[in-house]
């Protein structure tokens, strides 16, 4: 009775201990041996489960043995054990499908799961496994259709219990798994808002309590751009748990690197070196080690990255040839299918190669050797010319070289914004839009720049009106960059007008970052005025004093770190000082 209660209370290790005692008391009982193995499997004691299960030759025990061997990664031993099982038993078929899945044979796995489904009937677990196979094969539409059917089935049959949905309490429904898979599919298809909505729904259904680690991890991944610090803390929390999704370690190190915390990335990898070898793919581990090396010894990282990149290029070229061959197929229907399949595989390979290429270029970017960075990117133009990140960074390195190169940056930025002329502009990085507008202005195409800015403004207004997305700062950043450009060229009247425009509405756009660039322009103006090197009209001065007054009012709780000061100072106090300086100069 104690063993039974512990098992159903999910205290599997204690249940195993009680069943072990029962085995000693009743050595002839196969039932207790079966329950012991079952409890050990649930508790993660794979070796104990394998040891006992191998001594009993029953179908149920062999299946439990295969489960233990699967969890240990002993696929060959698992396959051998399954040969002793009844081959027409649906549990045997499911186990064989699982081996195929783990070996990457997703199409074979899917077929076996479908056979089991025909025998057992429509069960959410089998529907989920088939959907997972479609997802891993890149067949997102089919996967989405299946996970939606699981969710709808759960709502229909358990709508009164939906608020209590839990992966442990209602594991047979597979609703939590379906929600998570749907979020992953949406995120992979760059439908980030849809992914957030799916995860928000599952968190609300569980009242944000007793969330399983997979849900927590997925929620971190889709929301980390909104609050990186919180996301990193939650990944650290997951890493400290007894069990967690294998992607946690790699994602934590990646986030450290993305936010300039290279020392923490290095420490985390060093502290978990053995674990990293076990759960992170060799390709990703090599990339992370190279990325960490670039921050400390960039010159040593260059040959390492070249070595990693050289493994990817032949695969990409081979896949390009497959796409070319698919185009030559005579059958129209077959041609379409082959091209789609070959293109999906090429895109997947390209997504693996692009971060390595960008890391190579970044080494020279950080050294301000923009021409060398351009050469690195140009070498892969044939492979990457349709990839958005390649176009974006090619535009950046052209823009950074100034002079005639600014004009050359325009086509790369334009290719990004022309994907969807109606709704996708706010999905384009704001710095790309800002640089494009500056490039048009430098090329005396101010009307084109104004048209882009107007499109951005209208999309942001629509966004705020209908609440389609969270707030963006595209207009703010574009105006801030253009204003800074004009101030640098000492056209302060136009530049200051853009700076003031960038801060509207001030309650939304004023922060420590925007104030940093704003005050630089105001101080540059003050420096020129003090040397009698420029003049401004009364209207511009009045606008400056008005915006400084508003900043003084809104910036009381926004703090700035100042070199030489032990304590941070408020934006309000800095705005007040600049206002006093300008009043003193101009009166």
Image (spheres, grey):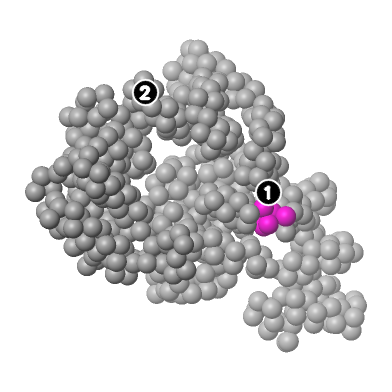
Q: Position of residue 268 (x, y in %)?
A: 67, 57
In the picture, which quadrant includes the C terminus?
bottom left
In the rendered image of this protein, does residue 378 appear above or below residue 51? Answer: above
Task: Point out which mark residue 280 bears.
Answer: 1
Closer to viewer: mark 1 or mark 2:
2
Q: Residue shown at 73%/70% (left/top)?
A: 43
Foreground of the two, 405 or 208: 405
Say if the magenta span includes residue 112: no
What secondary structure predominates along the stretch shown in magenta? helix
Q: Extreme front residue here?
A: 531
Q: How crowded is the residue under tag 2: few (<14 C-alpha within 10 Å), some, or many (20+)?
A: few
Q: Is residue 495 left or right of residue 133?
A: left
How many marks the image carries: the answer is 2
How far apart in space, not on screen, are marks 1 and 2 (Cα)?
44 Å
Task: Evaluate whether residue 463 shows in this view.
Answer: no
Residue at 59%, 20% (x, y): give it.
317
Residue toward you, 255 or 423? 255
Give the secondary structure at mark 1. loop
Please give the label number shown on residue 403: 2
Residue range (magenta): 266-270
Relative horizontal placement of residue 266, taking residue 183 as reference (left or right): right
- 160, 434: nearer the viewer: 434
Question: Residue 334, how many percent across, how many down?
Answer: 49, 21
Question: Vertical placement of 140 versus 1: above or below?
Answer: above
Q: x, y (%) of residue 305?
A: 66, 33
Extreme residue toward the left, this view:
538
Residue 267 falls within the magenta-colored stretch: yes
Front-most of residues 350 and 582: 582
Image quadrant in which the N terminus is located:
bottom right
């Amino acid at each position: 009775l104690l063993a039974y209660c512990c098992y159903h209370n999910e205290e599997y290790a204690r249940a195993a201990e009680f069943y072990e005692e029962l085995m000693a008391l009743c050595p002839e009982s196969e039932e207790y041996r079966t329950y012991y193995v079952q409890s050990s499997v649930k508790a993660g004691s794979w070796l104990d489960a394998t040891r006992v299960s191998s001594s009993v030759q029953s179908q149920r025990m062999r299946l439990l043995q295969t489960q233990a061997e699967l969890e240990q990664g002993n696929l060959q031993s698992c396959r051998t054990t399954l040969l002793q099982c009844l081959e027409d038993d649906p549990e045997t078929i499911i186990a064989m499908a699982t081996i195929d899945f783990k070996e990457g044979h997703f199409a074979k796995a899917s077929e076996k799961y479908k056979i089991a489904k025909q025998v057992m009937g429509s069960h959410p677990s089998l529907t989920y496994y088939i959907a997972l196979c479609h997802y891993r094969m890149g067949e997102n539409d089919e996967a989405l259709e299946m996970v939606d059917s699981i969710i709808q089935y759960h709502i229909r049959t358990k709508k009164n219990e939906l608020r209590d949905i839990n992966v442990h309490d209602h594991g047979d429904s597979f609703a939590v798994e379906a929600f998570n898979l749907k979020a992953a599919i949406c995120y992979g298809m760059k439908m980030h808002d849809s992914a957030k909505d799916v995860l928000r729904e599952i968190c609300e259904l569980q009242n944000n309590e007793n969330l399983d680690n997979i849900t927590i991890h997925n929620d971190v991944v889709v929301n980390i751009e909104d609050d990186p610090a919180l996301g990193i803390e939650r990944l650290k929390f997951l890493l400290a748990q007894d069990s967690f999704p294998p992607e946690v370690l790699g994602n934590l190190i990646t986030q450290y690197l993305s936010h300039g915390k290279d020392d923490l990335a290095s420490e985390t990898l060093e502290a978990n070196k053995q674990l990293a070898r076990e759960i992170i793919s060799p390709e990703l581990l090599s990339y992370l080690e190279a990325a960490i090396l670039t921050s400390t010894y960039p010159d040593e990282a260059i040959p390492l990255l070249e070595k990693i990149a050289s493994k990817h290029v032949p695969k990409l070229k081979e896949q390009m040839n497959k796409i070319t061959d698919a185009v030559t197929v005579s059958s129209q229907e077959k041609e379409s299918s082959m091209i789609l399949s070959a293109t999906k595989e090429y895109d997947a390979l390209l997504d693996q190669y692009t971060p390595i290429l960008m890391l190579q270029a970044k080494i020279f970017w950080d050294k301000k050797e923009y021409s060398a960075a351009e050469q690195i990117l140009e070498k892969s133009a044939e492979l990457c010319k349709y990839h958005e990140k390649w176009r974006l960074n090619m535009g950046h390195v052209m823009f950074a070289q100034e002079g005639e190169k600014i004009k050359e940056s325009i086509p790369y930025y334009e290719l990004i914004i022309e994907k969807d002329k109606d709704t996708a502009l706010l999905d384009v990085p704001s710095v790309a839009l800002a640089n494009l507008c500056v490039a048009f202005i430098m090329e005396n195409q101010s009307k084109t720049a104004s048209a882009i800015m107007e499109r951005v403004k209208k999309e942001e207004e629509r966004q705020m009106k209908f609440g389609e997305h969270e707030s963006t700062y595209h207009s703010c950043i574009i105006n801030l960059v253009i204003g800074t450009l004009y101030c640098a060229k000492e056209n302060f009247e136009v530049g200051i007008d853009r700076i003031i425009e960038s801060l509207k509405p001030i309650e939304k756009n004023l922060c420590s970052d925007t104030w940093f660039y704003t005050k630089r322009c105001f101080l540059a103006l003050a420096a020129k005025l003090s040397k009698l090197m420029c003049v401004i009209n009364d209207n511009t001065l009045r606008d400056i004093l008005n915006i400084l007054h508003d900043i003084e009012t809104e910036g009381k709780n926004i703090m700035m770190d100042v070199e030489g000061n032990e304590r941070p100072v408020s934006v309000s106090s800095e705005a007040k000082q600049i206002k006093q300086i300008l009043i003193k100069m101009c009166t």
